[in-house]
Image (spheres, coloured by chain):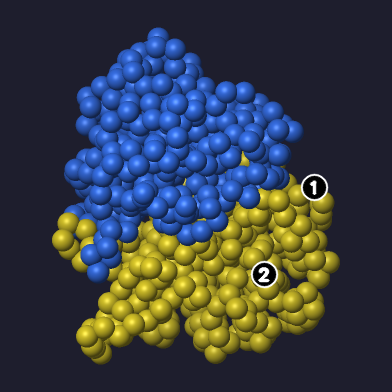
Amino acid sequence: MSAALTLGPVLFNWNPERWRDFYFRVADEAPVDTVYVGETVCSKRAPFLAEHIPAVVERLAAAGKEVVLSTPALVTTERERAAVRDLIEHAEYRLEANDIGALAYLAGKPHDIGPLVNVYNESALAWMAGNGAARVCLPPELTRDALRALAGEAAKHAVALEVMVFGRLPLAISARCYHARAHGLHKDGCQFVCNQDDDGMQVDTLDGEAFLAVNGTQTMSYTYNALLAEMAEMSAMGINRFRLSPHSLDMVAVARLFRDVLDGRTAAGEARNRLAEMVGAAPLSNGFYQGREGVALVGMETD
Amino acid sequence: MELICPAGTLAALRAAVDAGADSVYCGFRDETNARNFPGLNFSREELREGVRYAHAHNSQVFVAINTYMAAGRPQAWFKAVDDAHACGADAVILADIGLLDYASKTHKDLRLHLSVQASASNPDAIRLYQQRFGIRRVVLPRVLTIQDIAKLNKEVDIETEVFVFGGMCPMAEGRCSLSSYATGNSPNVQGVCSPASHVRYEQRDGDLVSRLGDFTINVFEDGEPAGYPTLCKGRFVSHDKAQYLFEEPTSLNAVDLLPELKAAGVMALKIEGRQRGRAYIAAVVKQLREAVDAFERTGKVPSSRALQDLAEGHTDTAGAYKKTWR
């Protein structure tokens, strides 16, 4: 089976027109097979994107991309629940669940599981398959050994596994908004300050070392996850879907780079150097996959 | 309302029971529980003895098996459930959907509680666990306000348990890999957060620097009380401003909210702190027992000065129960 490249949902609070234009360009130019669309981090942002979603999904579908709608990661209020229900009931596209609550509505319908749902082992994967999951994007914390074990189980259920291979990693979600807090505000009166940071707000240690990135209620890695050479290894395990997470750099170029690696046109080592250059100041990391701390970069010293 | 108390040792379990715990929760001495600390937790023999002691004093024992099973080797978790059942535990507290599936099919007479680590934050999620696995109680994640809890209890017919005292995650529990990003060890997988094995304290120009893995979590000036470098309780810099970006080094103390929690339909009140010593457990359980009893008797909560003194850094917060925390 040839490998599929997918584009996860935009996790950041981009200006709505920019968000729309980003997807228009993806539709026209990016060599990705599946595109996940939807506001997964903060329900306060969702209304601004809503008016652009029909045009975006139509353009993506017309360009031959498979469109999947992603549900929110943290659902607590009645309004947020209603939004999930509404999304699932009226969806003309496939759904990706990012919270267990959504699974109640998706039971028996083919659907995807997002990386923010805890699928750590074969039993959980088998349960998800039994509930109708056809594809599962695994949590970024999993190691190579865990992925291998899960790939074996996935084959038994004809579930396709997907792994995040590019971008800042979502590490935590909270009811509290750290973006607002950093600006001396509360979530209720946040003034949408998260729109000031296209790739998240840099968080340094007191020593001035870059450590994390805050994206509203979500806390992310400062480093950019980059699994390039690892893709061949995963393909050998039977994992054939690789997810890119959108950032403000040229994502079309990123997608082409990963596609070239998958198709054997560019060596992983060369691709890693080019990717590091495109990302800029933030280092790349692959520690989780390698069974180390997530921030680590193993076997990828810049030549 | 029931009082659910932590125990990391048999001595702490006895102390909690003696101080008036309705139930004590504990874990086995391995990665199957979210307080997998050196020198802590129960052997099978100790659990059996703990259950015997608790039952003799009209108290119950819940066993937390609330990490996520490791791919490729789930046996330790399955066995933990089997052994908790065999030891006579009154309930097991689980988070992993695969383990819930196993427990509900294998031990139909075993009472299942949904751990806070499952982070079931809405009625749809809770109902799914209830319908598919027969869970009897949910420990609510610390992301909900009291209003959210009240609505939830009106909608779902299930016992709800909430944390009222002790350490508090500002992140949705069971959905955080900050610790493993810095150290390779996480609550979900290894059952540890910001583990002591990766902590270092350094003296630097008269300051005390606390480090976790390769990262500075806090710097204390001479004489400033230094806390443990739990990652999310550290001081960090954004936009040139240093602050406790995620949460201050503070404890949850919701004892003043007992009337609101009861009115919201909460059945059980939980104390965090299986890693704490016997004397602390005895003191906290005693204080909370008195507060709950006084409230049930008079409808009023007595002043909680003594509890505040037991809080980390002697500061406390009502956390997410109040909307302004967000």
Residue furthest top in the image: A62
Residue shown at 55% from the left, 89% from the top: B279
Does residue B303 appear anywhere in the picture? no
The residue located at (57%, 27%) in the rendering is: A111
- Residue at mark 1: B105
Q: Nearer the viewer, residue A252 or A78?
A: A252
Q: Which residue is mark 2?
A: B30
Instruction: Indicate the quadrant where residue A55 lies.
Output: top left
Does residue A111 sit above or below B301 in this rendering? Answer: above
Q: Earlier in the sequence, mark 2 or mark 1?
A: 2
**Marks 2, 1: nearer the viewer:** 2
Amino acid type indicated by mark 1: Lys
Which residue is at a point 54% across and 31% down the rendered structure image?
A: A241
Which chain does the numbered disc 1 sit on?
B
A167 left or right of B15? left
Q: Residues within 10 Å of mark 2 (few under 14, many from 20)?
A: many
As drawn, B229 above or below A224: below
